[in-house]
Image: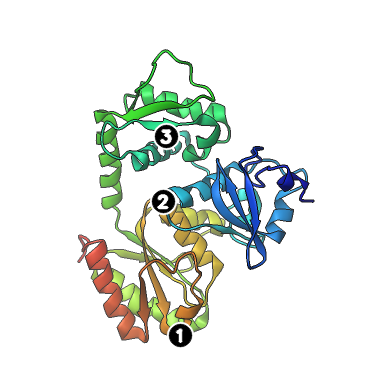
Amino acid sequence: MFEDLTEHVCPVCKLAENSIEKKRTPSRGFFIKCPRCKNFIITWEALVATGGDQGPLPKLSAWIRNFNEKGTGIPEIYQESPEKIPGASLPDYSPREKQIILLQNIERKTRYPGKPVQIVPKYDIPLAWAEAKDEFLYYITSLIERGFLRRTDDVDKVLDDLTFFVAITANGWDYLEKQERHIQERTQAFVAMSFSGDLKPIWEGPIYNAIKKAGYKPYRVDAEAHSDRIDAKIISEIKNSRFVIADVTEQKRGVYFEAGFALGLGLTVIWCVRQDDLKNVHFDTRQYNHIVWVDLDDLENKLFDFICAIIGKGKGA
């Protein structure tokens, strides 16, 4: 089942190169290093699910690459996780959205305005959530034609597998600023947390109250009736939010997935956990500052202060 790994093939994007590494982790998974996906951990069960005749999983590859690009830890892929291996729960971005994401990723790589950024189409496909190299090159070409990027090397060279360099133009920086302002105008705060009865009081009390008091609209996906697929609704509402509150008490994997998706979109995530569960926080997110709460009043006061300090008060405050 795992012959491909000995032949240096990435189990997610199916890139075949000698530089691809696989190492067993202390737990039940494998650490994979791929020049396209970058670094991730995949469990034995998930490795089986991606093997056989399973083709490339470009959305999952892009999700992994986003984690690496933003420095938000090494993602871990489970068979039973919300990613659902084939990528069924990952977003279907429109061509316009993919161009925005690509431009934002190039911005992230830009040390200062005018600094050329190296592009290697063979490896950088996930930066645009593209299915293949041709689609990726289409978005690069479109951004150049729209005046948001410019080539900084031989402009007559055909875009192909060879490395080339681009830089964001003045129009590109203006466009990115408008996108940022669009995010600043959003008023919704998405709440990711366990839906257990034991934690219902912290949603109805301190979390809801702190968000409202700070001037934003609290939203939890089970709080209103809808006929959408739950995974599609979650993704849609996160994309419509200004920031995300992720309370990881009870260690639900869905909460980690929703927080990771928000981070991939560039949204701020405010992490919370009950004090007696702090020791169980996943190692990939321990480096983030968590609101460690003891009781309802403690959480409400700390969360309100965090929102005001990190996000700022909304217009409804």
Cβ–Cβ below 8 Å for labels 2 and 3?
no
10 Å crowding of disc 1: few (<14), some (14-19), many (20+): few
Cβ–Cβ below 8 Å for labels 1 and 2?
no
Q: Could you tell me which residue is drawn at 29 percent across and 39 percent down? A: 176
Residue type at the position of mark 2: Lys
- Mark positioned earlier in the residue sequence (1 or 3): 3
10 Å crowding of disc 3: few (<14), some (14-19), many (20+): many
Badge 2 is on which residue? Answer: 70
Q: Position of residue 155 (x, y in %)?
A: 39, 16
Instruction: Determine the CA span between mark 1 and mark 2.
Output: 30 Å
Q: Position of residue 90 (x, y in %)?
A: 55, 50
Inspect this view and state whether residue 215 appears: no
Helix, strand or loop at mark 3? helix
Q: Could you tell me which residue is drawn at 22 percent across and 66 percent down? A: 309
**For the C terminus, which image quadrant?**
bottom left
Residue type at the position of mark 1: Asp
Instruction: Determine the CA span between mark 2 and mark 3.
Output: 18 Å
Q: Which mark is residue 99?
A: 3
Q: Position of residue 184 (x, y in %)?
A: 26, 51
Q: Taking 230 as reference, is 147 above or below it?
A: above
Looking at the rendered image, the disc whose residue lies closer to the viewer, 2 or 3, is 2
Q: Where, by quadrant of the figure, is residue 133 drawn?
A: top right
Q: Position of residue 175 (x, y in %)?
A: 28, 35
Looking at the rendered image, the disc whose residue lies closer to the viewer, 1 or 3, is 1
Nearest the viewer among 87 and 225 is 87
Q: Is residue 151 left or right of residue 138?
A: left
Inspect this view and state whether residue 157 appears: yes
Badge 1 is on which residue? Answer: 276
Instruction: Determine the CA span between mark 1 and mark 3.
Output: 44 Å
Q: Where, by quadrant of the figure, is residue 189 drawn?
A: bottom left
Residue type at the position of mark 3: Gln
